[in-house]
Image (tube, rainbow, N blue to C red):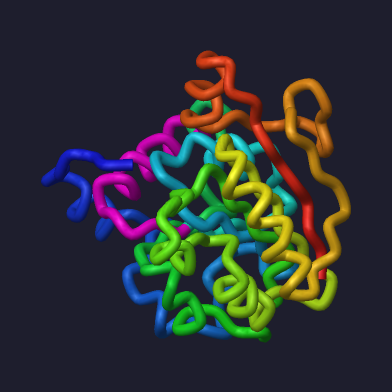
């Protein structure tokens, strides 16, 4: 998603208590950044404007969340959305951390010691051209990286509107040794998890009559 430059985003992020600008220094030590160090860590790759992570995290105080994106403007909006949702719930933001990083280089910031229990990938770029497919967040090349920091029973929750990406991703997961626990070509009619939180893209695609594809994969 393209978004206009927002000059306020970088200063607000740098001043935020739940943004980290030094993720490479936290590799293997992420749990120390959370107040409740007994909680498991879940990860969202490509958090965008934060509609998903803000609602998910506020509903699950027993889980710590890391949300990654590459664009300051996106992260700035995510920060504001998280603050608003937590304010409405009369809670401080104590179980979410935002950080800026290139997901293709994710092994520079996460390690097996971080013991990530779950990854969320929502409506990532489908990269339809053959020469670009290795950039897909569900491509075999990326899944092999995730295996290096997922817990031994770690899961990946994946949603997309794109048929080709979804079908290819099923193959990618199987090639990488993941077991697909559940899948659907119409998440809203055939839910495979409880309490589905709609993203901005999901609402848009659904209004256009496009069915949402989803799966759960486990190591």
Q: Is residue 10 above or below residue 184?
A: below
Q: Residue 92 placed where, x, y %? A: 52, 43
Indicate the quadrant where residue 191 lies. top right
Identify the residue at image location x=73%, y=23%. Answer: 188
Q: Quadrant of the C terminus?
A: bottom right
Q: Is residue 87 left or right of residue 115?
A: left
Q: Residue 144 placed where, x, y %? A: 63, 78
Q: Nearer the viewer, residue 149 or 35?
A: 149
Identify the residue at image location x=71%, y=44%. Answer: 60
Q: Is residue 71 visible?
A: yes
Start and end of the magenta stretch? 68-86
Q: Quadrant of the N terminus?
A: top left
Q: Is residue 17 left or right of residue 151?
A: left
**Is the magenta region chiefly helix, strand or loop?**
helix
Residue at the extreme front: 130
Q: Nearer the viewer, residue 68 or 139?
A: 139
Q: Is residue 79 magenta?
A: yes
Q: Nearer the viewer, residue 160 or 15?
A: 160
Identify the residue at image location x=85%, y=64%. Answer: 179
Q: Is residue 136 above or below residue 60?
A: below
Q: Residue 18 placed where, x, y %? A: 43, 57
Q: Is residue 13 left or right of residue 67?
A: left
Q: Residue 96 placed where, x, y %? A: 53, 54
Q: Is residue 31 visible?
A: no
Q: Is residue 186 magenta?
A: no
Identify the residue at image location x=63%, y=40%. Answer: 56
Q: Is residue 78 above or below residue 100?
A: above
């Amino acid at each position: 998603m393209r978004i206009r430059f927002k000059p306020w985003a970088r200063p607000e992020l740098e001043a935020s208590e739940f943004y980290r600008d030094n993720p490479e220094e936290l590799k293997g030590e992420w749990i120390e950044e959370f107040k409740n160090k007994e909680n498991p860590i879940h990860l969202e790759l490509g958090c965008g404007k934060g509609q998903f992570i803000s609602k998910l995290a506020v509903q699950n105080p027993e889980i710590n969340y890391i949300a990654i994106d590459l664009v300051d403007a996106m992260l700035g909006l995510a920060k504001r959305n998280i603050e608003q949702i937590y304010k409405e719930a009369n809670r401080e933001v104590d179980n979410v951390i935002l950080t800026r990083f290139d997901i293709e280089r994710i092994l520079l910031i996460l390690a097996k010691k971080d013991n990530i229990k779950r990854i969320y990938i929502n409506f990532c770029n489908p990269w339809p051209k053959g020469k670009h497919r290795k950039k897909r967040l569900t491509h075999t090349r990326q899944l092999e990286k995730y295996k290096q920091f997922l817990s031994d029973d770690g899961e990946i929750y994946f949603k997309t509107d794109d048929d080709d990406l979804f079908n290819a991703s099923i193959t990618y997961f199987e090639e990488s040794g993941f077991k697909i626990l559940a899948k659907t070509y119409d998440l809203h009619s055939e839910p495979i998890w409880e309490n589905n939180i709609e993203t901005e893209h999901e609402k848009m695609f659904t209004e256009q009559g496009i069915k949402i594809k989803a799966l759960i994969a486990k190591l």
